[in-house]
Image (cartoon, rainbow, N blue to C red):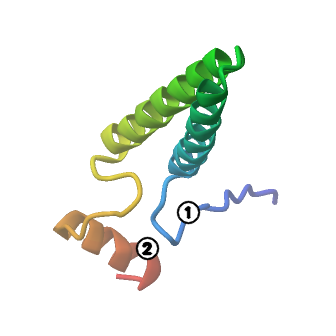
Amino acid sequence: MATTHVVHHHESHGNHPMSVVAFCCTIAGIACAGLWLVALAGGNAVSVGFGIAALVLFVCAITAFRMVAKHAHHGPVRPENTEIETHRYLDEYRGG
């Protein structure tokens, strides 16, 4: 008798994986913005590339955060303590 068992994977920390991508884009955008400022002060032509990279990374981070917030119906980094979240937690982790 063959049965299939699908393991339910869930995240106990409440963070959506896409918020990690958005966070990394934010950190990389800050780094590129710093390099852009230094290159701009030095008069290097590379400053345009760093500026565009920083802008693209910030736009990607904002888009990812907004997608997660819309998908999860709450903030992507910190879940809200609503009745629905409380019931979901009690059902999933405390067994009812």
Task: Say which quadrant the C terminus sits in.
Answer: bottom left
Q: Which residue is identified by label 1?
A: 10
User: How far across and down, in percent of the image, does residue 59 sit?
Assistant: 46, 27
Question: Looking at this view, is 75 or 5 the one in front?
Answer: 75
Residue at the location (65% across, 20% down)? 43
Residue at the location (65% across, 36% down)? 35
User: How far across and down, in percent of the image, does residue 47 sit?
Assistant: 64, 21
Task: Say which quadrant the N terminus sits in.
Answer: bottom right
Structural crowding at the residue carrying mark 1, measured as other residues with C-alpha within 10 Å and reported as few (<14), some (14–19) or many (≥20): few
Task: Assess whether mark 1 and mark 2 are in contact (beta carbons under 8 angstroms).
Answer: yes
Q: Is residue 69 left or right of residue 81?
A: right
Extreme residue toward the left, this view: 83
- Count of numbered badges drawn on the protein: 2
The amino acid at mark 1 is His
Q: Is residue 73 left or right of residue 78?
A: left
Question: Looking at this view, is 43 or 75 the one in front?
Answer: 43
Residue at the location (34% across, 44% down)? 69
Q: Compute the Cα span from label 2 to label 1.
A: 9 Å
Q: Which residue is identified by label 2?
A: 92
Residue at the location (75% across, 57% down)? 3
Is residue 59 shown above or below 79?
Answer: above
Question: Looking at this view, is 25 or 90 the one in front?
Answer: 25
User: How far across and down, in percent of the image, does residue 51 sit?
Assistant: 57, 23
